[in-house]
Amino acid sequence: MVESVKVSELVDRAKLKVYAGQEFLEQRGITVSDISRPGLELTGYFNYYPHERIQLFGRTEISFVKKMTPEERLMIFRKMAAEDTPAFVVSRSLAAPDELYQAAKDAKIPVLGSKLATTRLSSLMTDYLDGRLAERRSIHGVLVDIYGIGVLITGDSGVGKSETALELVKRGHRLIADDRVEVYEQDEQTLVGEAPAILRHLLEIRGIGIIDVMNLFGAGAVRSDTPIQLVVHLETWTPEKNFDRLGNGEEAMQIFDVTLPRVTIPVKTGRNLAIIIEVAAMNFRARAMGYDATKTFESNLNQLIQKNSAVDEAADATPNTTTKPNNGASLKPKTDETKKGGADA
């Protein structure tokens, strides 16, 4: 986590134009990600003025100050130009008032501009500052982009995480970080992972050493950061351990306040972990789209059980019409001739 971001970094990232105060870009630091659009301040109300934020002027603010006298504008802008105000930013390529330049120059505050709409510009700057100023946590693992899904591969040291990541890169996927992943919370539901600067684009393979993935496989094989959506945990297989075979065991891993689904894959000689993790990512995406193979199997199983039960019930309900002779004796009734013949005999 960094304590502040230089205004010069924001200028480069948001592609802002420097209207005035080029010499102040390195001196000014931004400590909060929130952006202020001064409304009440332009009317003279400064009781709750967020002076530590970037002050963003849009079409509404510029049109309002045009109705003020030059003296009023200068007085308001001088009150806004606090000691810790990072910068004044004007959107939509609008012309800033001369009084804003004068007040900014006296307080050594840069005046910046952009052609973007005010809401879009505010969102762009906020997203960038949220990522730079957010609290970070270092996690031991490998982060790979598989079909656009950020997969965090965890496991004990030496279990094969880096080798699996190398195989995934050869299969066309992209590496974000190896060995150590810097994770920060972008919002209440999104975690973003990136590599530390010293390990960016690098992969460690035991027996070979450090390799530069970007140099060997090209720019398409790496990515600077990605949202983390799935955790795959590699665990050495043992006969005593029961692993999920049907996929109905729900596992989760919590980082900060975000809960991520987790899949545990047993590691055993002969298993192609890269293909298994690739399929795990594809299965995760299918579930997110509403296709769940486990539910399909359970539905088929229930239908089979119901079918067999119906057959058994029908067999039990059929009456048994077969009669057996009693000790071999004939059940045919005797006629009068038989009776008479028997008497004559």
Image (cartoon, helix red, strand yellow):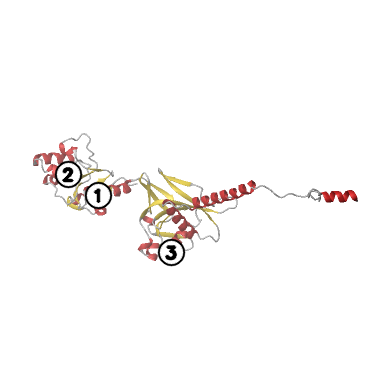
Outermost residue, right direction?
Answer: 345
In the image, residue 50 above or below residue 17: above
Amino acid type, label 3: Lys
- Marks 2 and 1, Cα distance to the nearest angstrom? 15 Å
Measured from the top left, where is residue 88 in percent x and y?
19, 46
Q: Position of residue 220 (x, y in %)?
A: 36, 62
Q: Is residue 257 left or right of residue 119?
A: right
Query: Does label 2 or label 3 sit earlier along the sequence?
Result: 2
Q: Amino acid at mark 1?
A: Arg
In the picture of the structure, the residue carrying the numbered disc 2 is 60
State whether residue 55 is above or below residue 224: above
Comparing 160 with 306, the one in front is 306
Give the distance between the C-alpha atoms of the residues marked 2 and 3, in whole angstroms.
53 Å
First in sequence, mark 1 or 3: give its number.
1
First in residue order: circle 2 vs circle 1:
2
Name the residue that disc number 1 marks: 120
- The residue identified by callout 3 is 170
Q: What x and y, as percent, mark residue 4?
A: 29, 46
Residue 100 rendering spot, x and y as whole percentages: 14, 45
